[in-house]
Amino acid sequence: MKKLKHSKYKNAGILFELLVRQVTADILNGQEDSKANGILRKYFSESTELGRENRLYRIILEEKAKDTSAADRLLETILRTRKKLDEKALNVQKYNLVKEISENYPIEDFLKGSINNYKLLASIYKVFDESVNEVVCDPREIFQARSCIVESIISNKTPTRLVSEDEKKDLIKVYQQQNEDVRLLAYKLLVDSFNEKYKGLDDKQKVLIREYINNVSNTNSLREYINAEVPFVRAQIMELKSKVDNDVIKIKLDETLNQLDKITKGTLVKENQIMAMLLSYELIKELKNLK
């Protein structure tokens, strides 16, 4: 019985997310003419089969249902739509997309970018593949993939916002009506607000955040940066600990040191590790202010 194989090279949802993150990294690096942005516009417009397939990924990621039955119906509707896509044209577009990415970025490093919802995107790919190509596979595997999708649709929740739903819909409608140049300008303004938003952070914290964003497609570089920073942070905390008399604070410092030991483990740098580093920097600032 054939095993369903997942391929990052063919997963429209993953390729789309990695390109969006690459655009962010490029702009933060001062590359306003980001190659990734041009690739996104070329391959993921609503007039392409790849763009239409990605739209189905987005619906699954963003839509919500009140129960399993409603989620199942939504998934079946999406699968029927997926079968109507031109498979030959879709495969050609994916091939050309990966080819163009590889011409502008190191493809292996690009595809190593961490994806938070990787399991869900891989499950969508497998269900699409099984549905379109009628692959004979282990029923348990397709059941697990479908269950992952259904559970995600049920658990999708609208995030807390500072605006009402009606205001949100109006803002989205206005934004969608703008041409691509206006959208890119709006996006650039969002990126330009980075320094303003994080003006309360010190240089070490800002550098860490920028390294995290800039290295979305170079996980080795980010890991090397983190591993090089941890000894510095440990040394700072150990020095400050020797000057602390409060036993409670000492216990907290010991726990922080314990967490720092875990940060260097693993190939990929996880978000909780970035947060631990940020908190360690903040702790050093506070202890210095107590002097």
Image (tube, rainbow, N blue to C red):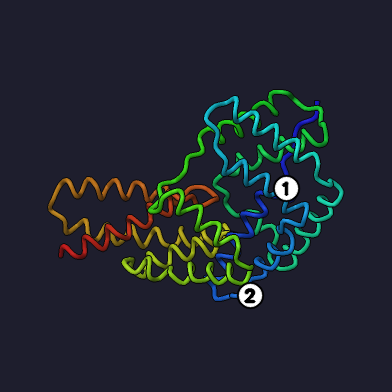
Q: Is residue 192 left or right of residue 38?
A: left
The quarter of the image holding the C terminus is bottom left
Answer above or below: position of 271 versus 207: above
Residue shown at 61% from the left, 34% from the top? 149
Give the secondary structure at mark 1: helix
Q: Is residue 132 left or right of residue 143?
A: right
Residue 111 rendering spot, x and y as whole percentages = 66, 54
- 10 Å crowding of disc 2: few (<14), some (14-19), many (20+): few
Q: Earlier in the sequence, mark 1 or mark 2?
A: 2
Residue shown at 56% from the left, 44% from the top? 62
Q: Which residue is mark 2?
A: 33
Measured in 3D between alpha carbons, the distance from the residue under mark 1 to the one under mark 2, in whole angstroms, is 26 Å
Residue shown at 66% from the left, 49% from the top? 13
Can you tell which mark lies on residue 19?
Answer: none
Residue 44 rendering spot, x and y as whole percentages = 71, 57
Q: Nearer the viewer, mark 1 or mark 2?
A: 1
* Count of numbered circles in the view: 2
Q: Amino acid at mark 1?
A: Glu
- Judging depth in this view, the residue of 118 and 177 nearest the camera is 177
Residue shown at 36% from the left, 70% from the top? 203
- Residue 218 seen: no
- Judging depth in this view, the residue of 165 and 6 nearest the camera is 165
Answer above or below: position of 167 versus 77: below
Answer above or below: position of 183 versus 254: below
Q: Which residue is mark 1?
A: 53
Residue 177 rendering spot, x and y as whole percentages = 60, 62
- Judging depth in this view, the residue of 44 and 276 nearest the camera is 44
Q: Is residue 287 left or right of residue 15?
A: left
